[in-house]
Amino acid sequence: MTPVFIGSEIYRNSTYGKNHPLAVPRVSSTTDLCRALGWLNGGNFAEAPMASVAEVTRFHDPAYVAALLRAEQTQNVSEEDRARFHIGAFSNPVYPEIFRRPMISAGGVLLAARLTLEGGIAYAPGGGTHHGRQDRASGFCYLNDPVLGMLAWLDQGVRRIAYVDIDAHHGDGVQDAFAGDPRVLTVSVHEEGRWPRTGLATDRAGGSARNFPVPAGFNDTEMRCVLEAILTLVRAHRADAVFLQCGADALEEDPLSRLALSNNAHWAVVAALMQVAPRLIVTGGGGYNPWTVARCWAGVWATLNGFALPDILPPAAEAVLRTLRFNRAAGRNPPAHWFTTLRDAPREGMVRPEVAVLARQALEDADDADRILGGAVPAPPDNPVFP
Ligand SMILES: [Zn+2]
C-alpha cells in the first residue's frame, strides 16, 4: 500500500506569536517542498479532517476542550481557565487557531490510525504533540494526538503498540497516559536534564516505558547504538503497530536543544522502524529551525516511499527554502546548503561510555520487557479486527 501524507492548510501562516519558538513555518514548508519535488500527487495526499469533540474526549477532559474553543472564540482567557488549563501563558499562548489547529492535528492522526488499520504507513507531520495532558496544555501542546491515535488503534483491535519518540524532549504526556498499560511500550530518546526533566533511565512507568536520556552533543553514531537497543525492545514487545514521533529538535542546528544529530539519523530510524511492524504512523513534533525542520521532514517522506534524494535541489524546491525567515542569529546568514540540499553531512563520532551504558541497560532488560509486557496482555476483544 502506498504511504499517505496527511496535511492541512491550517498550518500555513499559523503561529504562536512572533516571539514564540513556533513562530516558524514547518508543516506548510514541508508540504511545499514535497510538492516541489514531485513527491505528492492526488493519490498519496489526504486532507486532515477536524476531529470531533467526542473523538478527543476519548482522552481529554470535556471541560478543557470547551475552554480551548472558548479561547479561540474570544481570543482571550479567563484567570480561572489560565490557572486550571494552563492556556494563555507564554509556552501555550492564546493564538487565532488555538482550537482548530489542535483539533485538525488530532483529526489527522486519527485518520492515520484508520488508514493503517489493516496495515500500511501514514505520515502526519502536523501531529506529534507529545506533551499534551488530559486536562491541560503543556510544552506548546494542547491536545495529545499520539495518545488519541494509539487509543483509536487499540479501540479498533490493534493489540500491541510500540511508541518511539526521538524528539529532543521527553515524551512525558504519552508515557504517563499509558503508564502500566501492557499493550503500549513507550520509548523516548531525549536530552538529559532538559525540560520537562522527566524520563530518567530508571523511569519505567510500571514496566511500560524505556527512556534514553542522552547527553549534549549526541551524534549519529550514538543514535545508531541507541537504535539497535530500541529495535530489540520493539521486537521483544512483539508490536503489531509502531507510532514514531519524529520531532526535529534533536538536530544540530535546532535552537532548543544541544543534541547534534544530522537528518541522516532521523531517516535511519524511520527506515528501521518500517521493517518491524505492519502498521506505522509517523508524526512530526518539535523542531524550531525552519530550514532543518523542512529538510528533515521532507526527507522522512522520501524515506517512507523509497524516493531518491537529489544531491542538489531543483530550483522549485530551492525556492521553497529561500522564502523561509528565521528571527534568530542563525537566520541572519544561513549556510548555502540549507537552501540547496536535503541531506546534511553525517555527524559521526565516538559512542561515549554513558550512551553505551544506556543502550546496554535496555538490552539487558529486553527479556525482562518481554516477560513483563508479554505476559500481561489481556485477551483480545470478542470481535478482533485482526486474527
Ligand atoms: Zn521537543
Image (cartoon, rainbow, N blue to C red):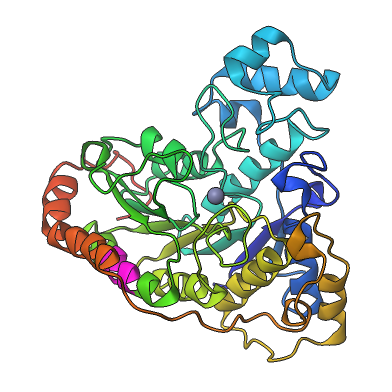
Image quadrant in which the N terminus is located: bottom right
> On the picture, is 378 further left or further right than 319?
left
Residue at 36 percent of width and 65 percent of height: 277
Q: How many marks?
A: 0
Q: Is residue 349 visible?
A: yes
Q: Range of the magenta residues?
A: 225-231
Residue at 70 percent of width and 66 percent of height: 294
Observer-nearest residue: 3 or 383? 3
Q: Position of residue 44 (x, y in %)?
A: 68, 69
Quadrant of residue 275 in the image?
Answer: bottom left
> On the picture, is 269 further left or further right than 90?
left
> On the picture, is 283 further left or further right than 221?
right
> Which SS type dominates the magenta stretch?
helix
Is residue 280 positioned above or below 86 on the image? Answer: below
Q: Position of residue 40 (x, y in %)?
A: 74, 72
> On the picture, is 316 further left or further right than 156?
right
Image quadrant in which the C terminus is located: bottom left
Observer-nearest residue: 185 or 330? 330
Q: Position of residue 322 (x, y in %)?
A: 86, 72
Q: Position of residue 112 (x, y in %)?
A: 57, 53
Residue at 70 percent of width and 49 percent of height: 48
